[in-house]
Image: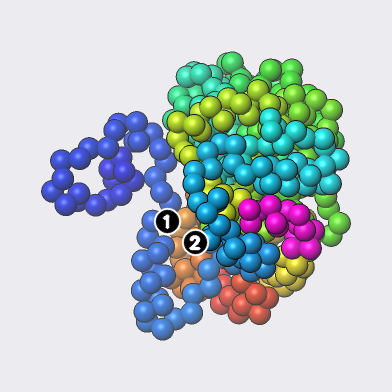
Amino acid sequence: MNANGSNGAGGGSSFEAPARLAGLPPYPLAAVPDIKARLRAAGEVVYDFGVGDSGLPVPDVAVETLRAAAVDPSLQGYGFQRGLPRFREAAALWMARRFGANVDPDSEILPVIGSKEAIALLAFAVLDPGDTALVPDPGYAPYFGGSFFAGARIVRVPLLRENGFLVPPDRIRQAPGRLRLVYLNYPNNPTAASPDRSYLEEVVSACAERSAVLLWDNAYSEVTFDGYRAPGLLEVPGGRETGIELHSFSKSWNMTGWRLGWATGNSEVLASLRRVKTFFDSGSYLAIQAAGAAVLEDSERWTKRTVERLQTRRDAAVPAFRAAGFDLEVPKATLYLWMRVPGEEDSESFCLRMLEEAHVVLLPGSALGEGGEGYVRASLTLDSDLFAQACARLGQVL
Ligand SMILES: Cc1ncc(COP(=O)(O)O)c(C=O)c1O
């Protein structure tokens, strides 16, 4: 494999990827798309629980607003980092309704092109080379990616079942070196761990003790079940001073491809991120920000519709996977079931075998970091009856 992460011969090109890229982990399960295509071409049904995208409808108001905004001449230019005032105001009002936080739409709301880019670029806004970045393992790839490209010393903290898949606050207090950035994501991808506010209070004080910036990635804040309420950084003492929180339209409002979110919190960190972004992007499309504002203005309605559908899927999926032989807890939030690999296989071999033999796509835990080994992730991507069919097939080959 070359530094591009591919096995291609390169078509005679003399291009050589920079040596730096060799430090990136290889792309896991690169073979999956080809296997899926082969199975489908042979007329087989493939049950794909791999990707973190519910596939549920986007809010009607997003489509209606975008349709009108797409022909509004005032919304066709660069958005730059300030973006659309209506969007920033809607995000600030939503923060007030949801978290009781008083947020200044000018200095404390930064529109982002989906939270992924902001996660990665935040590393350049916070870290000097050699500074320590604390990254959960398993965890979302750009935590590692951003810190890696920024030349940080990356300390991975394993998410262990015995700790409820939480990063223990003492791991923050005791992190080696000059700790500057702590990435945390709860409700969590992939483990679905869903702590309460007291955990967030503890990690805020641990970060403050170390003068480290906390990134509280709240991408799943509204994808919650059974009355669980995800906490927010701005509702805990010292939260606003200690870091920033990211919100995304991808999961709570099913708008993955629209690429929209916002960062909020410490205005100096936001200003630094804004400055970095000025050199990388020109902001998200203003018509999409108009659609995002319209969604936020009536967000509870759209969230409810999504969560009800996901809860029905979850309630079908959990017993179906258990009956097939998997060990898993009932998630209180997120799109994910985090399940132990039954038997002794490593998670990648297991997932490849499940794809070939049962035609079911699962994500190996190792794809999200070494700490994920021993687990697989299934996303709530399909409707309830399809979980039953897929799990019946899995049960036959386990
Ligand atoms: C933990 C976490 N944060 C952020 C995101 C990114 O969302 P987006 O870039 O689509 O806003 C994801 C997507 O899977 C995620 O799992």
Disc 1 is placed on an element classified as loop
Q: Give 247 or 169, whichever is nearer the viewer.
A: 247
Rendered position, 215 above or below 91: above
Q: Earlier in the sequence, mark 1 or mark 2?
A: 1
Q: Residues within 10 Å of mark 2 (few under 14, many from 20)?
A: many
Residue 196 within the magenta-colored segment of the rendering: no
Whether the residues at callouts 1 and 2 have beta carbons within 8 Å, the answer is yes
In this figure, which residue is indicated by the disc labeled 1?
29
Closer-to-camera residue (240/175): 240
Q: Residue 368 placed where, x, y %? A: 53, 46
Q: In which quarter of the view is residue 66 placed?
A: bottom right
Whether residue 370 appears in this view of the structure is: no
Q: On the rendered image, what quadrant is the N terminus found in?
A: top left
Q: Residue at x 41, y 70 (%)?
A: 36
**Above-or-below relation of 244 to 343:** above
Q: Quadrant of residue 69?
A: bottom right
Q: Amino acid at mark 2?
A: Cys
Q: Quadrant of the C terminus?
A: bottom right
According to the picture, the residue beneath numbered tag 2 turns out to be 351
What is the spatial separation of the Cα atoms under label 1 and label 2, in whole angstroms? Answer: 9 Å
Identify the residue shown where x is 20% and y is 49%. 10
Q: Residue furthest bottom?
A: 43
**Residue 155 coordinates in the image, percent (x, y):** 56, 28
Apparent side of residue 396 relative to residue 21 in the rendered image (left or right): right
Q: Which residues are magenta?
A: 290-303
Counting labels gives 2
Q: How far from the left and from the top, in percent, is residue 67?
A: 58, 65
Task: Answer yes or no: is residue 110 visible.
Answer: yes
Q: Main secondary structure of the magenta part?
A: helix
Query: Which residue is found at the position 53% from the left and 27% from the top?
Result: 275
Confirm or reject: label 1 Cβ below 8 Å from ligand 1.
no
